[in-house]
Image: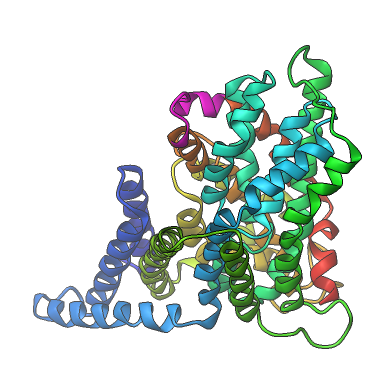
Amino acid sequence: MESIEIGLVVSAGLLVMVVLGMRVAFAAGLAGLTGLIWIFWAKKGYDPAQFMWALEVAVKTGGQVPHSKVASQALSLIPTFILIGYLAYYAGLTKALFTAAKRWIAWVPGGMAVATVFATAGFAAVSGASIATSAVFARIAIPEMLEVGYNKRFAAGVVAAGGTLASLIPPSAILVIYAIIVEQDVGKLLLAGFIPGVFSAIVYALLIIGMAMTIKGFGPSVGGFTWKERFAALPPAAPILIVVLTIVLFVYNPFGGEAWGTPTEGGAIGAFVVFLMALYNGMRWGEFKGALLETAKLAVMIFTIIWGVLIYVRFLGFADLPGAFSDWLTSLEMSPMLILVCILLAYAVLGMFMDAIGMMLLTLPVVYPAVMALNGGEMVSAADSTFGMSGPMCAIWFGILVVKMAEFCLITPPIGLNCFVVAGVRDDLSVQDVFRGVTPFFVADGITIALLVAFPSIVLWLPSLA
């Protein structure tokens, strides 16, 4: 059996294991190790006397992955970004954000829901975790929406969908993971997430306003706030701006010249700033310990998935499956843009059965080289490219599209994690209730993705300045 055939068989086995419920990290690691043994043994003609040699070489090859890849400095961003989000909760920034958004925005049709969307977008600017964002606002925003007459399913859907914005708006752990896998500039990818993230929030808000204006009694506006109350709500939420500016200035200096440091340093300083704010607002030792433990749990989960998947990626390299897939895609007599749309649709389907991080890690080693080949290669100029952008810009554009698809998968049944988190926080809601409430946001995400594909400048304008 040829290496390509071995790659296909092992990849099919991996998908079966994932569908049957095995954790992605362990399924990928097992598949990768099995594939390496198979390929090395096949080179010896399946000689029984050489099996132990194949096993030893496969273990050594796979065993080098955890340290060689995870020792990357860029990956240290992940725990710092996650820690910022948990500390921000204890610093009172979540409640302050929601209060400010409510007082300034709630007067529009569907105002409380719109305020929730923009509050989650603001919290996303200090939190790298969608799950944490959904959990926090399920406690804060849903009770207030129910109090003014919102349907509980839709209220839950707003929080679950709003939580996905943390995947795009920096600091974003998923964007960092994408940058590591495809070996692209972390700073430019973080910059690229700002405008699409805000754009997604605006599309969500317009959807809610449209529904409130056309469906009677859907989402009453909330008024009665004086200008004094509105301006008084701004200072408690202002520290968000400090954290955002800290991270941005360590990625891109808008005043000209070099950035102030690296994204890793920006994330660490951002975490320290939020830590000081949390102490000022009365965070106790138990709360600080809880934030550290939750950060460690989530970071270890992400790193474990990365370890397992990278062993599988090492196997894919020996099987030459990415190269074969790229050659096959570029040989198709179809428009490259149509092929790209089909890839994004495949992500939508795959996301129904896998978590976002696992889905990206498993597919990008094969799909990313194919998309780069469709555009003309990683070093192609904008003038000679298929999609009208250079290789590095195409990598950023495709990364934002993939992360947006990962956002979409966080709310799609049957394993939309944000929906499970919201249902877990609220005893009066079932998972089915949340999935029903989040359905309108599928339309909003579809519109957003279509516009990002049609107008790449939405994604590329900001990183092109860096």
Q: Seen from this angle, which residue lies furthest top?
A: 216
**Quadrant location of the N terminus in the rendered image:** bottom left
x, y percentage for residue 184? 64, 75
Is residue 347 visible to us here? yes
| Location of residue 186 by image quarter | bottom right
x, y percentage for residue 428? 46, 23
Residue 160 lies, with reference to residue 464, above or below; the image says above
x, y percentage for residue 231? 86, 47
Q: Please tell me which residue lies in front, 232 or 43.
A: 232
**Quadrant location of the C terminus in the rendered image:** bottom right
- Total numbered badges shown on the rendered structure: 0
| Residue at 74 percent of width and 85 percent of height | 260
Q: Please say whether residue 427 is one of the residues in the magenta stretch.
A: yes
| Residue at 71 percent of width and 52 percent of height | 122
Q: How is the image coloured?
A: rainbow
Q: Please say whether residue 176 is one of the residues in the magenta stretch.
A: no
Q: Seen from this angle, which residue lies furthest bottom?
A: 257
Residue 336 lies, with reference to residue 212, above or below; the image says below
| Residue at 79 percent of width and 70 percent of height | 463
User: Is 444 left, or right, of 280 in this rendering?
Assistant: right
Residue 33 lies, with reference to residue 229, above or below; the image says below
Q: Please tell me which residue lies in front, 286 or 203.
A: 286
Is residue 389 visible to us here? no
Q: Please tell me which residue lies in front, 32 or 377.
A: 32
User: Is 433 left, or right, of 230 in this rendering?
Assistant: left
Residue 201 lies, with reference to residue 425, above or below; the image says below
x, y percentage for residue 408? 60, 43
**Region of the chain picked out in magenta, as a range:** 425-436
